[in-house]
Amino acid sequence: MARAQQDFALRLEIEELYTEYAHALDNFELEQWPEFFTDDCLYQIVSRENRERGLPLALMRCESKAMLTDRVVTIRQTQMFAPRALRHLVSSLRVAPATADGVDVQANYAVLQTLVDDETRVLSAGRYIDTLVRDGDVLKFKSRTCVYDTVLVPNSLIYPL
Amino acid sequence: METATQKSPQNFRQWPSEGLGRVPYWVYTDPEVYALEQTRIFSGPYWNYVALEAEIPKPGDFVRSHVGERPVIVVRDKSGAVNVMLNRCAHRGVQFCRTNWGNTRSFTCPYHQWSYDLKGNLTGVPFRRGVNGNGGMPEDFDPAQNGLTRLKVAARHGVIFASFESAAPPFEEYLGPAMLPYFDRVFDGRELRVLGYSRQRIPANWKLMFENIKDPYHASLLHVFLVTFGLFRADQPSAVKMDQDGMHCVLISSKGDQTLNATTKDMKNFRADFKLSDPRLLDPVREFPGAATVVMQTLWPNIIIQQQSNTLAMRHLVPRGPELFDLMWTFFGYADDTPEMTQRRLRQANLMGPAGLVSIDDGEVMEFSQQGVRQRPGSAGLLEMDGRGTDDKEHMVTEAAIRAFYKHYREVMEF
């Protein structure tokens, strides 16, 4: 029973983390985004095709929290793109038993994008493949790989998923 | 498609009287122009990029690809030869191959199970002789006359091209003496290694992508990232060079420093104080002879060969209608790259592709262009930066290569 309560508490904590992550991106609180990760994190957006073919190319590849910060600064300061609204939908969390290395979690995601003068469309759909570790009293992403099913990216992917 | 070709070009559309200094907006929007392009350009006597040999190293390996908007299969047969054929069953036109890659001994259409060998020969027609004396194909049905449509194939140093037109000249002649050395600069005969694919659908006419890569003027203004880190800037040594027909082009430049000077002062977006927190993102090493650190080569009619620092990619254009195209990126390195070099290429790939720190700007601005030209297809764009000529230039403040492209385009299209 104590074990079940622990699992339940951990699951709630993970759901809270994923909710806050989605909230930050939906609200363009980009400066918050690196704070969800450890300093030595790996963040990647990978097509399902490349993953299945064993090819290493990623759409975004950040090999440290500092690279996440660089991505944010370039979005804010150097890139040119149309304004948009984004909505992250995350579901079907699968939490593996915790080990000394952390907790492996998978979840489905869909991100809806709305441009000026256009209806809402699916920007990306796929799954998160994550490893979480405890940093002080909070859980952080040690790695997050977003594997997208949407073979053709509808023009540009500006913001992280 | 056929009606467009029969139409007399004279009463079809009128190019503005200013000539090469203008591009009429109907070239980006008109369905009849688009249909004529599919016939004259993508099915004409030109070499279309289809794949890299490194994608299909073994007999039976295949990938799906496109020539213009038409789907093709690129396959290596048992003899080791590469064949390119239409992905369309000879029976009822079914696009039978549905997976992007694989290894197979033959192709079978799911509809009536007609099967083909790896050269595109028809090898099986179920119930060809009928069943219990009923049905069957006519006596004079000749499988040899009913294979898949095969394209002419050319390959050089690991890059595969195809043409619907048997009159296409030898590939080396097609590139010409001005362009071949730049092609061989990246494809020097070393074995290639594919690092991965990115695919994006851009709501714009396919020619806007070519114009973008033939336009160094924009690169030093739109791309704040390139400018800030000195990867491409108007004050650096650079050039645009064309072949004699204006079909192909290279855009060449050399990296400079991130310093505030007379030119960068004019760039309102230049950020002298912007430093990367993790400089590993941009840690280029010299790997090609000569001073150039970026060479973007555009080959008529469907491929851009990208070398920006250590990021190498094929950008394959697949038109999907007058106002839509798919951009298929194949990132690659060399089979003999060290693990550090592969890592470097993968990091620098952050600059390019659908989420590229640099190329996002282009995808977005092409969409904006299309939305603008759609409003007034009778109007024309202005192409007079650096005069109205089409000669090679030793600087960036020019639209000469776009003018050269349209000079050739008008000849092919008879506009």
Image: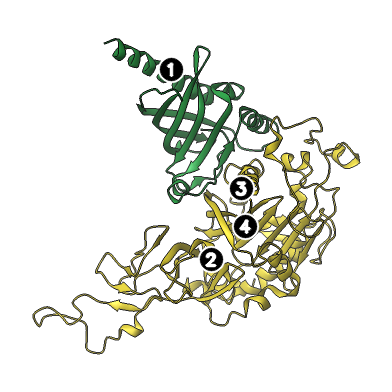
Chain colours: A green, B yellow
The relative height of residue A59 versus residue B12 in the rendered view (above or below) is above
Location of residue B62 in the rendering, given as x and y in whole percent from the top left corner: 43, 64
* Quarter assignment of residue B49: bottom right
Residues beneath discs 3 and 2 located on the same chain: yes
Near-viewer residue (A36 or B297): A36
The relative height of residue B415 versus residue B237 in the rendered view (above or below) is below
Q: Amino acid at mark 2?
A: Glu
Mark 1 or 3: in front is 3
- Mark 1 element type: helix
- Residue receiving disc 1: A16
The earlier-in-sequence mark between 4 and 2 is: 2
* Quarter assignment of residue B98: bottom left
- Mark 4 element type: loop
- Residue receiving disc 4: B336
Q: Amino acid at mark 4?
A: Asp
Q: CA distance from mark 1 to mark 4?
A: 46 Å
Near-viewer residue (B319 or A129): A129
Residues beneath discs 4 and 2 located on the same chain: yes
In-image side of B31 versus B306 (left or right): left
The earlier-in-sequence mark between 3 and 2 is: 2
- Residue receiving disc 2: B53
In-image side of A161 versus A125 (left or right): right
Q: Quadrant of the C terminus of chain B?
A: bottom right
Q: Is residue B18 visible?
A: no
Q: CA distance from mark 1 to mark 2?
A: 48 Å
- Mark 3 element type: helix
